[in-house]
Image (cartoon, helix red, strand yellow):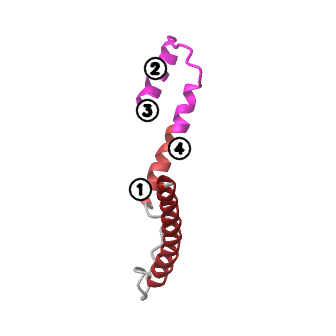
Amino acid sequence: MERLAFTLKGQIERGSFKVVGFNPIEFDTAIAKYRAEIERLRISPFKGVSFYSSDEPVKPKRGLIVAVGAISGLFFGVFLAFFFEWLEGVKRREEA
């Protein structure tokens, strides 16, 4: 971007400038803004990151695992019962 700004300023000074659709003088402002942003990111890359420390174990959550397993087992059992009923109905229709 700095190279482009330098080239455009040289063309303006020589009088051989072409219309580009934007103001090339604003490049200095944009370059300064980008440099400040890069410098800010270099200074504090972990800004806003917090670390949590606890004596209690985070994983495994046994209660949650048991609850999810029980509910999943219940749904699977109901599904299996309906599937076997459907299978018996198909067998009865084929015999008749």
Q: Helix, strand or loop at disc 2?
A: helix
**Mark 2 residue type:** Gly
* Magenta region: 2-30
Quadrant showing the N terminus = top left
Q: Earlier in the sequence, mark 3 or mark 1?
A: 3
Q: Earlier in the sequence, mark 3 or mark 2?
A: 3
Give residue 43's quadrant in the image: bottom left
> What residue is disc 2 on?
10
Q: Are marks 3 and 1 in contact (CB under 8 Å)?
A: no
Q: Residue at x 44, y 52 (%)?
A: 39
Q: Are marks 3 and 2 in contact (CB under 8 Å)?
A: no
> What residue is disc 4 on?
33
> What residue is disc 1 on?
42
The residue most toward the bottom is: 55
> What residue is disc 3 on?
2
**Mark 4 residue type:** Lys
Image check: 59 left or right of 83?
A: left
Q: Viewer-nearest of labels 2 and 4?
A: 4
Q: CA distance from mark 2 to mark 4?
A: 22 Å
Judge the density around disc 2: few (<14), some (14-19), many (≥20) Cα neighbours within 10 Å.
few
Image position, residue 47 (x, y; %):
48, 64
Q: Nearer the viewer, residue 55 or 93?
A: 93
Q: Residue at x 48, y 16 (%)?
A: 11
In the rendered structure, does residue 68 fall within the stretch colored magenta? Answer: no
